[in-house]
Amino acid sequence: MPKKSSTAPNRRPERSINKRISDEPPAELRRTLQRIGIAADHGGYELKEYLAGKLRAAGHEVVDFGDGRPKEDDDYPDFIVPLARAVAAGTVERGVGICGSGVGASVCANKVAGVRACLIHENFSAHQGVEDDDLNLICFGGLVVGHALAWELMQTFLAARFIGAGRFRRRLAKVAELESKPPKETL
C-alpha cells in the first residue's frame, strides 16, 4: 500500500506562527471586544505603544497606565502595580504588563492578590494559561519579543476563555489561599 503524502487532501494542514499571513486573528479566535489595561516602563514603552495602537484599531477599549513617555529612570512597579490592581478589581478585563525582559513586570504583578500574570513568548501558553489557570495579565519583554509575535500572542490571550473544570478551580482555590495567609516559617 502506498504511503500517503503530507499533501493528501484529507489531512489538515498544520498551523504555525510562520505561516500566518495577516494581522487578523483566525476566525476561531475572534471574540467580543474587551477593556484592556496596558502598562510599561522605558524598556517596554515602544512595544506598549505598538500594542495599544493595534488593540484600539481592533476595537478594544485601552486604558493606558503609563509610562506616558520613555524615561530611563522610571521603575516598572510604578506602572505595573496600578495596572494589576485594576485587573484584580475588575476595572479592566485583562492586562498587559511590559518591561525590558518582562520578568520584573510578571513578578510585580503577581504580588497583587487576584492577579495571575505570566511572561509569555509562545502561543500555547498564551491560550492554555487562560483556559486552565485563568491568566488575567500577560507580560512581555519589550527588549525580547518582536512586535508581530507580541500582537499574535496578544490576540490569542484575549480570545482564550477559562474552561472552569473542577480540577482547575480546585488548583486556583489553593493559589488564592496562598494570597490570604502569611508565609509559614520552615525552620
Image (cartoon, rainbow, N blue to C red):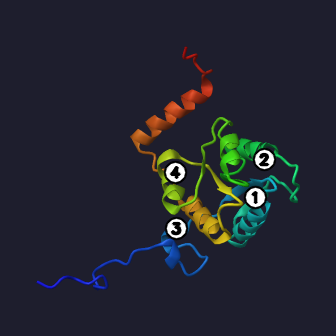
Disc nearer the start of the sequence (2/1) = 1
Q: Which mark is residue 44?
A: 1
Of marks 1 and 4, which one's residue comes earlier in the chain? 1
Q: CA distance from mark 3 to mark 2?
A: 31 Å
Instruction: Check disc 2: other Cα within 10 Å, few if <14, some if 14-19, many if 20+.
Output: many
Residue at (56% x, 72% y) in the render: 25
The secondary element bearing badge 2 is classed as loop
In front: 83, or 89?
Answer: 83
Give the residue type at disc 2: Tyr
- Residue 171 picture location, percent across and down: 46, 36
Quadrant position of residue 146: bottom right
The residue that mark 3 highlights is 29
Question: Residue 180, relative to residue 150: is it above or below?
Answer: above
Secondary structure found at label 1:
loop
Give amino acid for label 3: Leu
Marked residue nearer the N-terminal end (4 or 3): 3
* Structural distance between the alpha carbons of marks 1 and 4: 22 Å
Image-based side of 178 in relation to 170, left or right: right
Circle 1 residues within 10 Å: few <14, some 14–19, many ≥20: many
Give the quadrant of the N terminus: bottom left
Q: Earlier in the sequence, mark 3 or mark 2?
A: 3
Look at discs 3 and 2 and give the one toward the viewer. Answer: 2
Circle 4 SS class: helix
Asked if residue 3 is positioned above or below residue 68 in the image, the reply reads below
Instruction: Give me the C-alpha separation between circle 4 and circle 3.
Output: 15 Å
Q: Do the residues under discs 2 and 1 have CB atoms within 8 angstroms?
A: yes
Q: Are marks 1 and 4 in contact (CB under 8 Å)?
A: no
CA–CA distance between discs 4 and 2? 23 Å
The residue beneath circle 2 is: 76
Residue 58 on image: x %, y %: 68, 71
